[in-house]
Image (cartoon, rainbow, N blue to C red):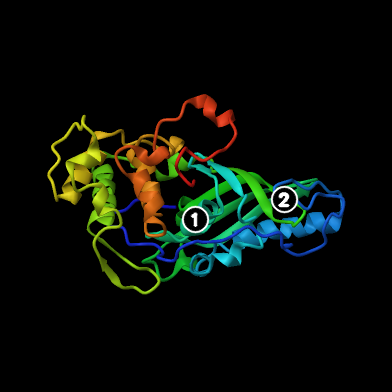
Amino acid sequence: MNFKVLYLTGLFTAGLSISASTAVAGGKIETSCSDDVKIACKTKDPEILNFRKEQIKKLYNGLIYPGPIEIMKDPAKANDIFQEGFVKGRVTPVGSFTDFNGVVEYFYALAANPQNHVFDIKFTSVLADEDQASVTVDLAFCENTNTDCEGMTSYQKKKDTLTEIGYFVFNKQNKITFFDVVIPNLSEAKDAKNPIEKAGRIAGICAFLTVGHIDPITGEQKKGGTCTEYFDSRDDFGSNAKFLVIPGAAFVNCVAFMSSIPFGSYARANSNSFTCRQTHALLTPLRPEYHCAHTAFDGGGKCIDFPYETYYEPIEAAPGHGH
């Protein structure tokens, strides 16, 4: 989740296409609950509650590299954790994820992003009661260029660690249908500290979107950006662009556009800002037809300014957008 990038490499080219299933994830089930996969299932059975806690541990242990790459190669491997077709949730301050694809991309793709990856986790607590399981877990990240992650100093490991605190709701099939997670102090950990760092991040993201990237699975150099067509003409920037748009100069236009909007902060990553677009850019190799719009001029329903009160509204997809 360290998004400090001078030149981003690509993510994963595998697509995600999963249909809904009523298959049980495993373990004992609460027979009094509805078979409807959308309905939460309350239980006091200790065996079921323990299984759900193990589901949470399985999810987070699966974020340790190279686990995320294996999931992105075969998303069906996440079907026994998340309820395909109906799972949705929120990660504050990153945003909401309203379908199976978006949920899988958040947990797994951002755990093995173009610059670093999760190499260790530590559970502070995992609790379960009725239809929910809660977790507090630390995720330690390591730069992809570091060949000795285990040899990091205690200070460096702490500096590159993020914490997730939240709860997950389960159905009768013992799969997650909803989650609400918070990453505390994300802005303190990951915000750019000075103008030079900000300029470097903008240049790196725009190179990724419009110039080229490296496929981390094959190591192959890819020519062309993931979203070049969203930055290469005047029509891409509306009628009130505050900068000169040069037809065919996608990288230059991208840098000009990203520099014209608020840089933003990870205190509110779901906003009309460069910071929001930086996060979504990491996902563009997965499904450019969805994520490129989020990096572009109008924010695609994701990188827009949300009123404060929307935090308390039901989590739904933006009109015309999958997640």
- Contact check, label 1 and label 2, Cβ < 8 Å: no
| Closer-to-camera residue (161/219) | 219
Q: Which sits in the foreground, 143 or 261?
A: 261
Give coordinates of residue 284: x percent, y percent: 37, 55
User: Which residue, given by chain and number where applicable, does mark 2 sit on?
Assistant: 170
Tell me if mark 1 has few (under 14), some (14-19) or many (20+) residues whose alpha carbon lies within 10 angstroms of its own: many
Residue type, numbered disc 1: Glu
The dot on residue 105 is 1
Left or right relative to 310: residue 207:
left
Relative depth, front residue between 261 and 313: 313
Q: Judging from the image, what secondary structure is the residue with disc 1 in?
A: helix
Label tally: 2
Q: Tell me: residue 120, above or below residue 133.
A: below
Labelled disc at residue 160: none
Query: What residue is rendered at 81% in x and 57% in y?
Result: 48
Between the C-alphas of marks 1 and 2, the distance is 20 Å
State the residue in front, 72 or 34. Answer: 34
Amino acid residing under circle 2: Phe
